[in-house]
Every structure is written in C-alpha cells, then in structure tokens.
C-alpha cells in the first residue's frame, strides 16, 4: 500500500491500523502504539481531525493504553474519540455506544466507577435503540453494566436488573 499509494493516503493509514491491531494481539505494545499513532496522524492530515476513521483508530489506541494500565492516557484518547463520533455521526450511530463503553471501561479499570456508570447506562440504551433487544452487543452492554453494579455493591438497587436481563438474553437464543 505504501509503495502504490504513498504515506499520506487513507489506505496507508488503514494498513498501519491493521498491523497495529495484529501487533497488539501479539503483545508488541510499543510497536502497536507507534503504528496506531501514525495511522491517526495520517488520517487527521488526509481526512481531517474530525473524521470517524480517526475516532475508530483512537478507540483501538485507547484499548491498547488501557491494557497497559495507562488509564489516564486511555481516558483522554477515548474522550476525544467519543467527541469526534458524536460531532461527526451523531448519537444514533452504532460506533457511539461502543466508544462510550470503551471510555467507561477505562474509567472502571481506573477505579472511577461512579463516572463509568452513566456511560454504561447510556451505552446500553443506545445499543438497544440501534440494534434491538436480541443483539449480542446489547448482551455485552448488559453484562458490562451488571458487572459495574456488582463492583459498586448495588445489589438492592432495582437497577441491578441488567444481570437478570443478560441471562434472559441467552435463554432466548
């Protein structure tokens, strides 16, 4: 891709992003981070800083940073990614609840449970609205929210029902 398209091309950025994901899965975090950042830089230059492709790669970088325990860095990247998606695509796009969930995950990993809660709730609401009640993404959102309620020790709160709904999802399958 680099030879045929050049460095400053969206397809070059995509190739760098795919390679970064592969390297991340192999545990080569430093190389993966470098390629994610290169992909983001290319797409910002070629497509503009507010393009959804920039946000998608930022989401992947945020996951990588969270996996390394770099929670503050992950949260900053995830917040920017979410803002780009909300601005460029609006709330009613399937990438938005995923980005919200990624930010909630980084906050939750950092022990900032009360800040993660409204994001988990909103992510579930949007997933249900956009994908319907019997979608695997909805089940994942239900599980994430139920896990957060467990960490918050909110067993007597009627809002703990996501765990019950999560089990019901699998009984319907």
Image (cartoon, helix red, strand yellow):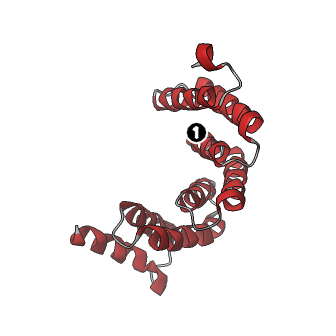
- Looking at the picture, how far across and down is residue 63, in whole percent? 57, 44
- Residue at the spot 57% in from the left edge and 29% down from the top edge: 29
Taking the image as shown, residue 152 lies to the left or right of residue 133, namely right
Can you say whether 164 is above or below 29 in the image? below
Q: Does 58 sit above or below residue 45?
A: below
Q: Is residue 81 left or right of residue 117?
A: right
9 up-or-down from 161: above or below: above
Q: Is residue 152 visible?
A: no
Residue 16 lies left or right of residue 72; in this view the side is left
Quadrant in which residue 39 is drawn: top right
Picture residue at 37% right of the left edge, 73% below the top: 133
Place of residue 32 in the rendered image (x, y in percent of width and height, measured from the top left) = 59, 28
Residue denoted by label 1: 64
Using the image as rendered, state which of residue 7 and residue 26 is in the foreground. 7
Give the residue at the far top of this rendering: 3
**Quadrant position of the N terminus in the picture:** top right
Q: Secondary structure at mark 1?
A: helix
- Residue that appears at 22% across and 67% down: 173
Q: Is residue 37 above or below residue 55?
A: above
Furthest toward the front, the residue is 4
Quarter of the image where one finds residue 8: top right
Tell me where residue 10 appears, x and y as whole percent. 64, 32
């Amino acid at each position: 891709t680099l030879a045929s398209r050049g460095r400053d091309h969206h397809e070059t950025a995509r190739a760098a992003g795919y390679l970064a994901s592969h390297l991340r899965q192999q545990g080569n975090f430093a190389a993966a981070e470098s390629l994610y950042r290169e992909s983001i830089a290319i797409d910002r230059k070629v497509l503009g800083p507010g393009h959804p492709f920039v946000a998608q790669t930022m989401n992947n970088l945020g996951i990588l940073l969270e996996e390394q325990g770099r929670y503050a860095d992950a949260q900053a990247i995830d917040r920017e990614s979410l803002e780009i998606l909300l601005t460029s695509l609006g709330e009613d796009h399937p990438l938005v609840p995923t980005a919200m969930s990624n930010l909630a995950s980084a906050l939750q990993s950092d022990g900032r449970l009360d800040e993660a809660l409204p994001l988990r709730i909103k992510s579930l609401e949007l997933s249900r609205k956009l994908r319907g009640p019997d979608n695997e993404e909805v089940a994942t959102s239900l599980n994430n929210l139920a896990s957060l309620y467990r960490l918050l020790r909110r067993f007597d709160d009627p809002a703990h029902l996501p765990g019950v709904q999560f089990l019901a999802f699998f009984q319907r399958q």
